Image: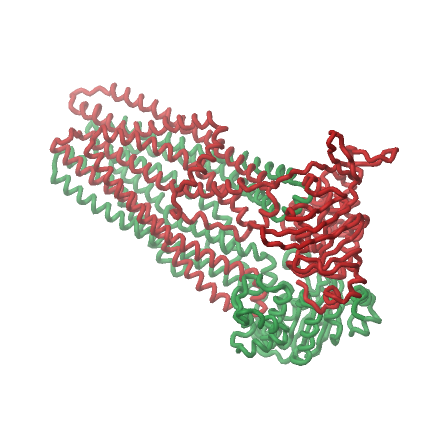
Amino acid sequence: MPQQPTGRRFSPRTRKLSKRDATTVKRLMQYFKRYKVRFTFVLICIIIGALASVSGSMFVKVVIDQYIEPLLLTPNPSLDGLTGAITRMACIYAAGIISTFLYSRVMVSIAQGILKTIRDDMFTHMQSLPIRYFDTHTFGDVMSRYTNDADTLRQMISMAIPQVFSSTITIIAVFAAMLYSSVYLTLFVVVMLIIMLKTTKFIGAKSGHYFIKQQVALGKINGYIEEMINGQKVVKVFCHEEKTKEGFDELNENMRAVSAKANKFALVLMPVMANIGNLQYVILAIAGGALAINGIGGITLGSIASFLLLSRSFTMPISQISNQFNSIVMALAGAERIFNLMDEEPETDEGHVTLVNAQYNEKGELVPVENYTGMWAWKCPEENGSFKYIEVKGDVRFDSVDFGYEENKTILHDITLFAKPGQKVAFVGSTGAGKTTITNLINRFYDIADGKIRYDGININSIKKDDLRRSLGIVLQDTNLFTGTVLENIRYGRLDATDEEVYAAAKLTNADGFIKMLPEGYNTVISGSGSELSQGQKQLITIARAAVANPPVMILDEATSSIDTRTESIVQKGMDALMHGRTVFVIAHRLSTVQNSDVIMVLDHGRIIERGNHEELIAEKGVYYRLYTGAFEME
Amino acid sequence: MMKHLFKSIRQYKKASLLAPLFVTLEVIMEVLIPTIMASLIDNGINKGDMSAIERIGFILIIACILSLIFGFLSGKFAAEASTGFAANLRKDMFYNVQKFSFANIDKFSPSSIVTRLTTDITNLQNAYQMVVRVAVRCPVMLIFSLIMAFNINRRLSIIFLFALPVLGIGLFLIMNNAHPIFERVFKLYDALNLVVQENLRGMRVVKSFVREDFEEEKFKKASKNIYDNSIKAEKLLMLNMPLMQFAMYTCMLLISWIGAKLILSSSMTTGELMSMFTYASQILMSLMMLSMVFVMITMSKASAERIAEILDEKSTLTNNDNPVFEVPNGSIDFDNVYFSYADLGHNSAPVLNNINLHIKSGQTIGIIGGTGSSKSSLVQLIPRLFDVTEGSVKVGGIDVRDYDIETLRNAVSMVLQKNELFSGTIKDNLRWGDENATDEDIERVCRLAQADGFIQEFPDKYDTFIEQGGSNVSGGQKQRLCIARALLKKPKILILDDSTSAVDTKTDALIRKAFIEEIPDTTKIIIAQRISSVQEADEIVILENGHIVSVGNHEELLKSSDIYKELYKSQMKGGEE
């Protein structure tokens, strides 16, 4: 997806920790629960590893102070003590290495496991969300939770958490060791540390400021690129290349200037920190030397040397934590967005009437059967615990239905209509008149505000949503095929359809001809965009997909509007075959496709203003007549 | 390939050279500092010589400040070099795309070009920043630290000659094995994202067919795949840490052990031992960093390749050496024209076969045919959006390949089937046709295209802002604005490729009437679905599968062409008689 918001990872230090983050952390902890034992093991290993590394720094002091210095004074030095010390240290180191090895491996499984759980939960939850959610959120917005947000979260779990924990342990241990060596020098290190943190904050704020600017500039230039490249053919036709370049140059230069500043501050931070560390080292050596020479604070030569090493081990984890801090803040923001999606209210379903395969037995009674028969029945539970079976015929009635996407903003007013089994009902009207909205109500993508919709005499609210939708076939203007073979795409309509049934559906809907011409026939793989196929061919596949499902009611929403009239006549034949014997709701742009409907509803601003068949409406000489004669623009 | 990309460095060459220079200087200072520090301990602290401490301390502070300045400058130049390089690359790509012919554009598809201009550029900018900075820093640090260590003590430094290869080979093996798995993981992520994307787009289909569980299975399979492979790759990668620790700790222990002996035999000082520890960590850390830099640069290789593809793409159309700068009139001649998209790599069968068509200046020509009949391909040859495969297309009696492309396209105005408006006011959009058009000119063409009426109804009239993609005007309005824009060029030939499909029939008729009355000398070619749109044309061409099957006026075709008759009947059924 081109407009993937790649930028958010560029905006560090733009967000502070808040109370909301505390709740996010708590929820994240829930995911750790499953790994309680393993995570505890990781923490223990981290502690061992950190302590091993701290004792490494201390070891230098021990070697110099306890072995080398005294030995220098003895005439015939024995190295036995030193050998023992080094062997002991080697054991500690070995423990450190082993624990690092273990925890890093276990942590990988924990991080990836948590991530997988979150990912799967998120998708599962997303599938349960009502259409309203998808209509009110952009794809890019939802996508970024799977890409950017999940990725920052992974980094936090697998890198930031262990590092922060290990750094904290190191800091505590080193601080204790420093205090033990020299209180004075420790105080000095603390002062330097504060200076260091202040500097980081200052540079960080500067860089953050420019990173936000860079984000804006990036958004602008990417927007421009997208617009121009998508309209590149128009640019060519109008020889507008030079103008386009001018506009680009301006944005590009702006982007470069801002981005150079932002990156400068980010890049400068590291050497500045490192050299403040170096300065601290030098001043520490001078101050320590002065103290040692003057015999203040009981400082020995060995303790200065090891203190210098310690001070390094002290500042390093602190700058590591401050580095990780940004990624944690960003990961929490990402986690919050992920949890927001998971908190979205799922579709509710209080229906109890279900759909079953059925057939008439010898006595002429409708009975449920296991296998697909092409005939269905509504299975309605009775109060006495038994079931009543009603044949699914496709009788749909709207009774004074009102509806609005938002409360207090009614889009459809007092819609009353009935479609008898096998009838073809058409809706025409301009964009926004409410044609698609009506079909959204039949399959309960949205719930009505007032009135009633009955399906074979049953209120659709008491039918289980899944079963209701199973009984309704749908062909939309957007073809929406899935990556996979043509065969798989058609079978999407009914997963247990045999290959023969798929071929039959394709033949019925006139799709068989072109599919056979494809390089691999029915096994041709369609990629995500389906760019291998023409719009008309894709539409034929979706019609075949609906045909294989063989539902009693069909909804065709602008199914042929992106097909030209010549091809349409082929598609139309497929559609006619599909529509035969079913109740069909048709929304069409071209009036030629609705002429043979049993009834045509002309919608305007959410009201049915005219209804009747083609001849009646023409004779009426109203809106339909004017639309038909082209005196009216319909868009 | 890389060489080609580096051409885009240009004015940032200085910064690109200064950045590594200052990095080198910074590293030298960083390497010197431990030695000075050692001398501070040996000559100052150990001897209890406060003046020596102060003197050497002063030198040290100077060294630190220098290092700070060098570090600052290297960061500054690296930022300038990398962002500048990225800006130049973006510019070079964008400029080259502007040179692309339709064939080039179709080869890449807009969305792929956009990704290369955005995401790939960002990747490469980061990689370049690494190259001028970290990739220089690590080897320099490694070499200088080694030199210093050997300078202090040869025997002790031999440790590194063993440690380095062990660590190096270990890191190499880890990266080498992990890298292909990571590549696979990236692909698996793409597959997962594709599932999400298809679900988001097709949610109505998923819900209608009640396929939520089915899709969940699909997603979980993709998710599990990522899980398995990521664990494999990361577990390998995580071996880095213990390996590094092993090398580091071993060096520390050996240095302590041998160092102690050396000190006792008076061939080394305690200060020198201290600096050896520092050098040990510098040497091993830089090797570790180097291996990571290496991986990150390899990862950006794919982006670099994608960018190079755009930069290397040569336009399939070039200007004639001695181009003609004047189009005499609007006559068009197709002589034995064959055309195929073979150079686009797919569908090599000709889409136009033996087209012979002669249009006189000022005529109105209608073209009718189903999808795949190559109507659009036919007219796109006239402003030379594509070149013929065989035969010739002449405008004003001169082969279109002999014209200066801009001259030709200014004389041949085409309203594309998939047309775009750009964000900006209506006036801005229309002036694409003629930059210097006066407000009167604009209003005149809008009246011609029957757009003036609705524009006047907008509160801001001609200054109404059009959103990106023209999303705030209706399809019919958009089409009329596009026609007006094309008219503003005052073309000799006007081509409408199914450009009034969303306009109502009455307005459509008014537009055609205006054409006949107001621009009688312009040759007009109209591709349409509706017979009514072409009915009064001087000649109507019926295309089928890339062949002209009939030519004639409405009455003639009604008599001679079955296809035309059938179309006419189906569209007029019960209609306007």
Indicate left or right for B397 with B136 as reference. Answer: right
At 76% from the left edge and 43% from the top edge, which residue is drawn?
Answer: A457
Instruction: Indicate whether A512 appears above or below A106.
Output: below
Q: Residue at x 34, y 22 (%)?
A: A91
Above-or-below relation of B14 to B278: below
Q: Quadrant of the C terminus of chain B?
A: bottom right
Q: Where in the figure is residue B515, as x and y percent of width and height? A: 67, 77
**In the foreground, A316 or B90:** A316
Of B454 and B491, which appears nearest the observer? B454
Q: Nearer the viewer, residue A131 or A307?
A: A131
Instruction: State left or right for residue B277 relative to residue A365.
Output: left
Q: Please, which colouring scheme is shown? A: by chain
Q: Is residue B186 visible?
A: yes
Residue A360 in which image quadrant: top right
- Image: B324 above or below A402: below
Residue B86 placed where, x, y %? 44, 56
Q: Residue at x 74, y 64 (%)?
A: A624
Query: Drawn colour of chain A?
Result: red
Q: Report x, y in % for residue B106.
A: 61, 59
Q: How far from the left and from the top, in percent, is residue A335?
A: 47, 40
Picture quadrant where residue A354 is located: top right
Q: What color was chain B assigned in the picture?
A: green
